[in-house]
Image: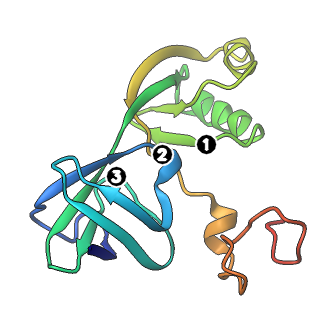
């Protein structure tokens, strides 16, 4: 079977042989059987868990590159009156610990119970959209060293290795 052994960051590669369209929930991976949009079956087999960012490419063992794309999903797009208001809304979203994407003067999140109404109460403009979702990486997980037992850094199991 073809194997994907490395991820080449966005901007550091030029031509992909194919694409793979993935939801945000399956883009934090170390090992997983995958099939590209054009039908290339391969085993992603990285040395550690890695976030597959939109625009990154998976380097296959035969040298081909497969570009990572975001699968469209229902999201809410949040805008503020101005930059200061948008920063205030970002702070409020962060206090709810939901995945968020910051881009182009707006914030995109998945619908979360009660959050839509909460943000409207703070004066946010809300629009429902269908778009690819590329949320910011979980900074707590990104800063933790790999675990000896093979579980992802920050895995909430009550151990001393768990994220704070």
Please tell me which residue is depicted at 69% across the width and 73% down the height of the picture.
151
Where does the N terminus fall, quadrant-wise? bottom left
Could you say which disc has been placed on residue 34 in the image? none
Residue designated by label 3: 54
Mark 1: give few (<14), some (14-19) or many (20+) Cα within 10 Å: some
Q: Earlier in the sequence, mark 2 or mark 1?
A: 2
Query: Do callouts 2 and 1 mark residues in contact (Cβ within 8 Å)?
Result: yes
| 49 or 45: nearer the viewer | 45
Query: Do callouts 2 and 3 mark residues in contact (Cβ within 8 Å)?
Result: no
Could you say which disc has been placed on residue 99 in the image? 1
Please tell me which residue is depicted at 44% across the width and 64% down the height of the picture.
32
In the rendered image, is residue 17 in sight? Answer: yes
Real-space CA distance between mark 2 and mark 1, rounded to the nearest whole angstrom: 10 Å
In the rendered image, is residue 135 in sight? Answer: no
Real-space CA distance between mark 2 and mark 3, rounded to the nearest whole angstrom: 9 Å
Is residue 34 placed above or below 62 in the rendered structure? above
Residue 125 position, x and y percent, is 55, 14
Please tell me which residue is depicted at 41% across the width and 76% down the height of the picture.
45
The residue at the far front in this view is: 1
Is residue 112 placed above or below 146 in the rendered structure? above
Q: Is residue 14 left or right of residue 151?
A: left
Residue 138 position, x and y percent, is 62, 58
Quarter residue 160 falls in: bottom right
Marks 2, 3: nearer the viewer: 2
Quarter residue 6 falls in: bottom left
Could you say which disc has been placed on residue 24 in the image? 2
Where does the C terminus fall, quadrant-wise? bottom right
Quarter residue 57 falls in: bottom left
């Amino acid at each position: 079977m073809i194997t994907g052994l490395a991820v080449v960051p966005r901007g550091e590669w030029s031509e992909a042989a194919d694409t793979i369209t993935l939801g945000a929930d399956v883009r934090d991976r170390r090992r997983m059987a995958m099939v590209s949009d054009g039908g290339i079956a391969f085993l992603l087999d990285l040395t550690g868990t890695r976030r597959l960012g939109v625009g990154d490419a998976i380097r296959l063992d035969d040298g081909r590159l497969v570009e990572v794309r975001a699968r469209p999903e229902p999201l809410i797009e949040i805008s503020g009156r101005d930059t200061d208001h948008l920063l205030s809304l970002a702070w409020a979203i962060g206090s709810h610990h939901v995945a968020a994407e910051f881009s182009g003067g707006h914030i995109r999140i998945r619908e979360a119970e009660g959050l839509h109404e909460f943000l409207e109460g703070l004066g946010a403009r809300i629009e429902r959209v269908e778009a690819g979702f590329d949320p910011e990486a979980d900074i707590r997980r990104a800063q933790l060293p790999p675990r000896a037992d093979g579980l992802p850094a920050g895995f909430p199991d009550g151990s001393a290795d768990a994220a704070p």
